[in-house]
Image (tube, rainbow, N blue to C red):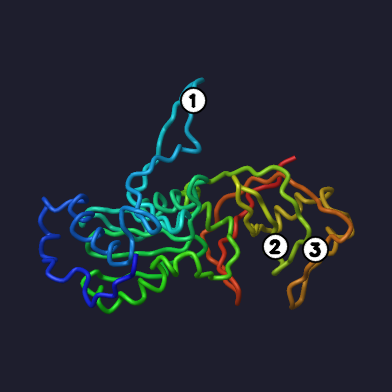
Amino acid sequence: MKVEKRLNILAGFDFGLLDDEEFGEDSVREEIILPILRGLGYGHSKPNRMIRSKKLLHPFVSIGSARKNIYLIPDYLMEVNDRYAWILEAKAPSQELLNTSHVEQAYSYAVHSEIRVPYFSLCNGREFVLYHISKQNPVVHFDLRLLPSCWDELLKFLAPENVLQYDFGLKKDFGLHLNRLGFNEFKSLVFPDVPITFIGKIDDKLYTFGTGLTFGQDTYVATFDFDSKVMRQLRGKIPDRAFDALVTPIEAAMKQVHFADAVYRVTIDCRVGDKLAENEDEIFLPLWINRVLD
């Protein structure tokens, strides 16, 4: 299907209708989302098709002693040449899109083991928001009244010939992943046998280490921050020489101790942090260690 670059995909639509309480989610789908998807190059048949209401088995739910099949159903799943490419969730005009559980919901569809796509988006008729699973903030966000001026940007990310090609070069961060799934509400998350290959001392009250973790079918990079109290709990779990070096006060630059001889594993109780960190290569959300468990 050839992509048609129209000046205004929604030409003639009266945005005043969005204030009518009768104009709900179904109307957003038919009057706004469907024309946008068709304009981007998606139809009801292959190779670039939109799949409506695909059932996904809920990965976490069991009821009593018997497992019951509970399904998640994304509104739209786009497929390009037999590969899933991105998902879109429709919301009513009265629904907020940013910083809500709707983002968590759409993200959970995108990373579901049956889908695993790089992009997820939300549209309420007033706004269009597009996220990449590796970034905290939207990669595209605009008022739909500005669609003509944003159309080329949307094509750059979501046109069938582009959507599976764009690569941010970011590692998948475990803290961001948990935050997107809503685990930031939990004050205690226990992870057994977390490998430690180094510990960095940022100052006399703040320590950190990073490691790789497997969650489901994906591998993530996780950053764990902790204070001097937790550092003392690592006595006997890492070599004495390394422990002594790390608890010695530092004067200026950050100190790092690498364990070249072995990987040391600990079981930790932690929570999702609330401060994003960034370097020249990536954005990440450290987990905060509450305590080290025996």
Relative to 257, 275 lies left or right: left
Mark 3 lies on residue: 246
Circle 2: element type: strand
Task: Name the residue rendered at 32%, 67% in the picture.
Answer: 40
**How far separated are the C-alphas under marks 1 and 2?**
42 Å
Task: Name the residue rendered at 72%, 66% in the picture.
Answer: 204
Sequence-wise, the earlier of marks 3 and 2 is 2
**How far separated are the C-alphas under marks 3 and 1?**
48 Å
Q: Amino acid at mark 1?
A: Arg
Sequence-wise, the earlier of marks 3 and 1 is 1
Can residue 169 be seen here? The reply is yes
Task: Name the residue rendered at 51%, 59% in the picture.
Answer: 274
Q: Is residue 192 above or below residue 69?
A: below
Mark 1 lies on residue: 67
Mark 2 lies on residue: 207
Question: In the rendered structure, are the residues bearing label 3 and label 1 in contact, judged by CB atoms less than 8 Å apart?
Answer: no
Locate the C terminus by quadrant.
Answer: top right
Percent coordinates x, y for residue 103 in the rendering: 39, 55
Q: Nearer the viewer, mark 3 or mark 1?
A: 1
Percent coordinates x, y for residue 184 in the rendering: 49, 51
Q: Amino acid at mark 2?
A: Tyr
